[in-house]
Amino acid sequence: MLRISLLLGLLLLLTAAPSARAQRVEPAKPTRAHPKRQARLDAAVPETSALLYTNGALWTLNDGDNPPAIFRVDTASGRVVQRVRIVNFPNTDWEELAADSRYFYIGDFGNNAGRRRNLRVLRLPRPTPTDTTATAEEIAFAYPEQTDFEPGTYRHNFDCEAFFVAHDSLHLFSKRWADGHTRHYTLPTQPGRYVARPHEMLDAQGLVTAASLSPDGRTAALLGYTKTGRVFLWVLTDFEGNNYLAGRARRLRLPGALRIGQVEGLCFVGPARVFISNERLVKHIALVKQRLYRLDLRRWLVR
């Protein structure tokens, strides 16, 4: 059945109609942005790999091979105030966190080596303030273009660390090691086995590690870094429908990884304000602790 689905997904890729609006990559003015420190994050989340702001609460999770839990964090102090353990799935390579009105979604789709055949998104009921455990359902998927599952670590285009939920779909933005682009894919929000549906692409000029959509649905953002440690944020506006990469795209340059760390988490906390988080980074003699940052995007949202 999965083989048939893969063939159907490839057919969708080859026959997909182009977006009605052409992509416009424009220079950001100013080109540099300087996030401000919000808080040092709790020692329980040294590998913070996602941010989600929903109903006035901030959530995060740790990267792969850590305990399978999500954490609610106080935005002023960075302290963990709630921990919810997923009882029926491991943290294989958790990378992203998203939510709609009924569910949380965990992106277990990190794939540095390109070998995974168990890519999935975990769906769980929205936690209540007193929950300590949760049971998840699986949304399993494959990429229609992938035929080689031994491409070599960091030498392929089938990694992912970024997604959000909108219009009853999961919107994934790939981390393409081979060419530095990102492709937009969609999946249903219902548990099952699927082939991701490919859509438009953007030359991200680096590795996309997080995505977020503003509460009003008018602005999307992609966070990432280059292989040489340059950190960037794409601000996406003027798109039609779900064609997030087919509107106006502006690339902001943030402080480098040795100053701001390995950025992995991004979420909107208002129409023009985002939080950013970084994993704890130890490189040679340098140490960048896990932190939460804030950034106002209003100057780059002039339409």
Image (cartoon, rainbow, N blue to C red):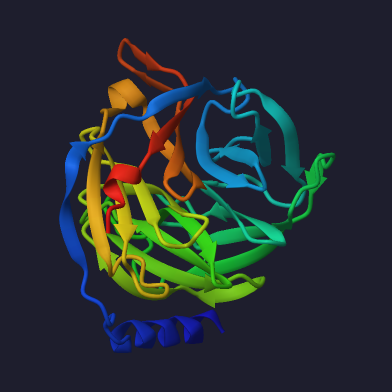
Residue at the image position 52 percent from the left and 49 percent from the top: 96
Q: Nearer the viewer, residue 273 or 153?
A: 273
Q: Residue 118, can we see it? A: no
**Which quadrant, please, contains the N terminus?**
bottom right
Say whether residue 17 is left or right of residue 140: left
Residue 169 position in % (x across, y down): 54, 71
Q: Quadrant of residue 129?
A: top right
Above or below, comparing residue 6 to residue 105 in the picture: below
Q: Quadrant of the C terminus?
A: bottom left
**Which residue is situated farthest in the right direction here?**
130
Q: Position of residue 273 (x, y in %)?
A: 44, 42
Note whether residue 72 is visible: yes
Give the left or right position of residue 20, taking residue 274 as reference. left
The answer to whether residue 24 is left or right of residue 15 is left
Q: Is residue 187 above or below residue 292?
A: below
Q: Is residue 78 above or below residue 295?
A: above
